[in-house]
Amino acid sequence: MSSRSPYPRLVADIGGTNARFGWIAHDGAAIDRIRTLPCAEHATLADAVRAYLAGTGLGQPGSMAMGIANPVTGDEIRMTNHHWGFSISGLQAELGLQRLVVINDFTALALALPSLQPHELRQVGGGSARPQAPIALIGPGTGLGVSGLLPAGDQWVALAGEGGHVTLAASDAREEAIIAVLRERYGHASAERAICGAGLVALYEAVCQLDGVAAAASTPADVSRRALSGECARSVEAASRFCALLGSVAGNLALTLGALGGVYIGGGIVPRLGDFLDRSDFRARFEAKGRFQAYLAQMPVFVIDASVSPALLGVARALDQDL
């Protein structure tokens, strides 16, 4: 499909907080000129693209592919966790692109999984990944992304879905009380309401509400710092519940896909937690599926900790496919 996607190529990973861009100058070239721009500093996605091109001194790209934190079901895109909205065909015309490919950001990340190197992964329990077996992907960041890879001969098919919005389930009475607070606040207590940056704060606030004390932290960074230092018991509980709920939801996804090829955790939050995840109930909750505990126990979980956004590799691959 390379002839349909002329060089130079612009690739992008568009999240609710940051937009990451990279440049592929010619066939066989590595992604370079990687820059991260805060979404809030640009009125539109087109403005962010132009700011990237101007800031790096680059000229007109021939084609572009982006992964975006949003469902992609037609020409019109309205981001779930940011105010940007655009028409895909309109953006292509506005930027003068010969081809524009837009896919979900976690579909893009899924496409990149086979290219990740061992030093970019940290295993959290389980055995060895089985070759040519389904792979699951989940990741808390601004939202909760979910995808997966299914083998299709010598190729992989990436899933495009919104699994972050499944209904959150409790495993004990305290957790049910916390989820009840989220349900009262949001109406529907989805997995994303607890397992993302804002969700970590929401868990902390729920714990404070149940304990009858005022919340003293207001950002994910504040809650994380207070939890990792151990200085705040309620922050520790919020981060612990975050990890436990992530384990439960990841285990559900692994069962659904039969992910004997491994379960990968992306997003920006989990790598910052370090070994807190390992010491939490994450792995126990991942495996706590009754008669299928032994089935899940063999599945390896890998935390992605790459210096370059792996989703950029995924969208680069999308330009060579009929997506």
Image (tube, rainbow, N blue to C red):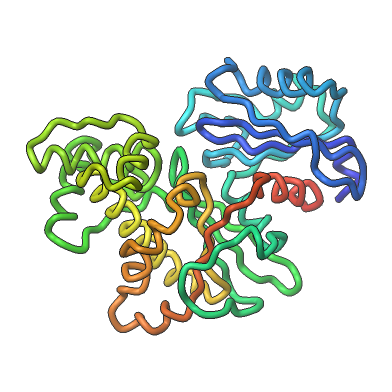
Instruction: Answer with left or right where residue 108 lies relative to residue 176.
Output: right
Q: Nearer the viewer, residue 234 or 289?
A: 234
Q: In this view, does 180 lie above or below 260?
A: above
Residue 202 image point, x, y percent: 27, 38
Residue 8 image point, x, y percent: 88, 35
Instruction: Answer with left or right where residue 248 lies relative to residue 113.
Output: left
Instruction: Answer with left or right where residue 70 lies relative to residue 50.
Output: left
One can see residue 232 in this view: yes
Residue at 26 percent across and 49 percent down: it is 236
Residue at 73 percent across and 23 percent down: it is 52
Counting labels gives: 0
Residue 57 image point, x, y percent: 84, 21
Residue 40 image point, x, y percent: 53, 20
One can see residue 64 in this view: no
Q: In which quarter of the image is residue 134?
A: bottom right
Residue at 80 percent across and 43 percent down: it is 31
Q: In which quarter of the image is residue 155?
A: bottom right
Instruction: Answer with left or right where residue 203 lies relative to residue 309.
Output: left
Q: In this view, does 146 lie above or below 300?
A: above
Q: Nearer the viewer, residue 97 or 48?
A: 48
Q: Nearer the viewer, residue 8 or 281?
A: 281
Q: In this view, does 157 lie above or below 83?
A: below
Residue at 57 percent across and 67 percent down: it is 135
